[in-house]
Image (cartoon, rainbow, N blue to C red):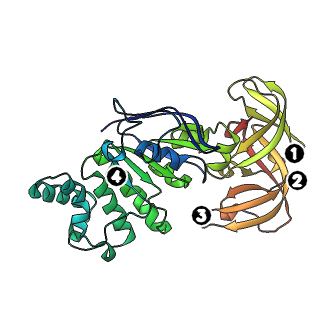
């Protein structure tokens, strides 16, 4: 088991630069997710670690070894693809033991290792079946078992849950995390699904146009996004155009939508035009007759609502390009479209973004 270091890596395909001077250190035993939209460079990064492609510039270090020019089969990497790539003519046990047989392991050792892995993935009863005879979720676990049968230094997974339905995907997130923690194996996971990354990862690397936007825990990235892209990509958020007009101790004073609001100071100097970011769950309906001076308040009209079981999403027209989204309890949510309402948020529950 080893960590991974990506040092100053650039990857170009002809005139197109897929990665711009990428630097990233993945800790030993860590579950790290590369998160971003299509074309952001996350799969290119994974393929570089695997050795399927070579960097235009920079180096890949696996443990203490520079593997930049080492062929994939000699990197001791385990790989799980989106389509699982199980051999349809082999039993589940034979699929899992395939890599061990190729390396000349004795039959008894293979049998014991396969049995241990079937227990680990909770499929001890399916060893003699074929891939077509088990479910998609079971195939996914089998693919993981095959990838770690010969213990790799690093396990790479490229959107392995993409073909599963929502309920099964949620179940498999828990299972994959459990397996990774039991094996204590360094894992790099590629996904465009923010919820998936947040549920499973020790750290998340948010990527955009071949660059790293932010690295941190799920809580850190969600609660404290550093750029407008991260704020908008990770979770639902309201972004309000504003202009900083002054300061008040640890807070900035800004004008937005005809109202004056306070926001916490970010890192570095901040002036001029900015974006104020507020999550829907941090907004509340406000009665101005008993308004709380600790709240920022803006006014608008209810333009729509959707029911989502334990909450109702309210869409409030405040005169911006898009409505503000508020999450409220169903019993507290107004139902009359067009009604005037005031919405507010605690000062500390907003962020000011300059990028």
Residue 111 picture location, percent across and down: 14, 59
User: Circle 2 is placed at which residue position?
Assistant: 319
Alpha carbons under labels 1 and 3: distance apart: 30 Å
Assess whether mark 4 and mark 2 are in contact (beta carbons under 8 angstroms): no
Asked if 206 appears above or below 96 in the picture, the reply is above
Q: Indicate which label's residue lies in the foreground, 2 or 4.
A: 4
Q: Secondary structure at mark 2?
A: loop
State the quadrant of the N terminus.
top left
Residue 342 picture location, percent across and down: 82, 52
Mark 1 and mark 4 lie on one chain; the one further toward the N terminus is 4
Alpha carbons under labels 3 and 4: distance apart: 28 Å
The label number, if any, that marks residue 178 in the structure image: 4
- Seen from the viewer's position, the closer of residues 180 and 351 is 180
- Seen from the viewer's position, the closer of residues 241 and 23 is 23
Alpha carbons under labels 2 and 4: distance apart: 47 Å
Mark 2 and mark 1 lie on one chain; the one further toward the N terminus is 1
User: Circle 3 is placed at which residue position?
Assistant: 310
Asked if 104 appears above or below 93 in the picture, the reply is above
User: Circle 1 is placed at which residue position?
Assistant: 257
């Amino acid at each position: 088991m080893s960590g991974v270091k990506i040092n100053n890596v650039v990857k170009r395909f002809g005139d197109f630069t897929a990665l711009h001077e990428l630097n990233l250190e993945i800790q030993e035993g860590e579950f790290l997710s590369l998160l971003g939209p299509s074309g952001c460079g996350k799969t290119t990064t994974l393929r570089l670690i695997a050795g399927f492609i070579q960097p235009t510039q920079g180096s890949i270090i696996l443990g203490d070894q520079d593997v930049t020019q080492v062929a994939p089969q000699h990197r001791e990497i385990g790989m799980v693809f989106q389509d699982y790539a199980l051999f349809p003519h082999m039993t589940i046990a034979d699929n899992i033991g395939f890599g061990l047989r190729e390396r000349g392991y004795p039959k008894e050792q293979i049998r014991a290792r396969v049995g241990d892995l079937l227990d680990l993935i909770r499929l001890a009863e399916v060893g003699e079946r074929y891939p077509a005879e088990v479910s998609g979720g079971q195939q996914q676990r089998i693919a993981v078992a095959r990838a770690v049968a010969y213990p790799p230094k690093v396990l790479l997974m490229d959107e392995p849950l993409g073909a599963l339905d929502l309920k099964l995907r949620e179940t498999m997130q828990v299972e994959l995390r459990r397996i990774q923690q039991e094996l204590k194996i360094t894992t790099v996971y590629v996904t465009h699904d923010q919820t998936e990354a947040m549920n499973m990862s020790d750290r998340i690397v948010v990527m955009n146009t071949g660059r790293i936007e932010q690295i941190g825990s799920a809580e850190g990235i969600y609660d404290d996004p550093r750029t407008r892209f991260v704020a908008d990509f990770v979770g639902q958020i309201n972004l309000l155009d504003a202009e900083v007009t002054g300061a008040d101790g640890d807070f900035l004073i800004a004008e937005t939508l005809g109202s004056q609001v306070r926001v916490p100071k970010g890192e570095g100097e901040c002036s001029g035009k900015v974006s104020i970011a507020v999550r829907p769950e941090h907004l509340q309906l406000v009665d101005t007759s008993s308004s709380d001076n600790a709240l920022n308040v803006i006014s608008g009209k209810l333009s729509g609502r959707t029911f989502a079981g334990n909450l109702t999403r309210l869409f409030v027209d405040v005169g911006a390009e898009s409505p503000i989204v508020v999450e409220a309890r169903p019993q507290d949510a107004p139902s009359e479209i067009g009604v005037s309402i005031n919405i507010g948020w605690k000062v500390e529950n907003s962020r000011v973004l300059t990028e």
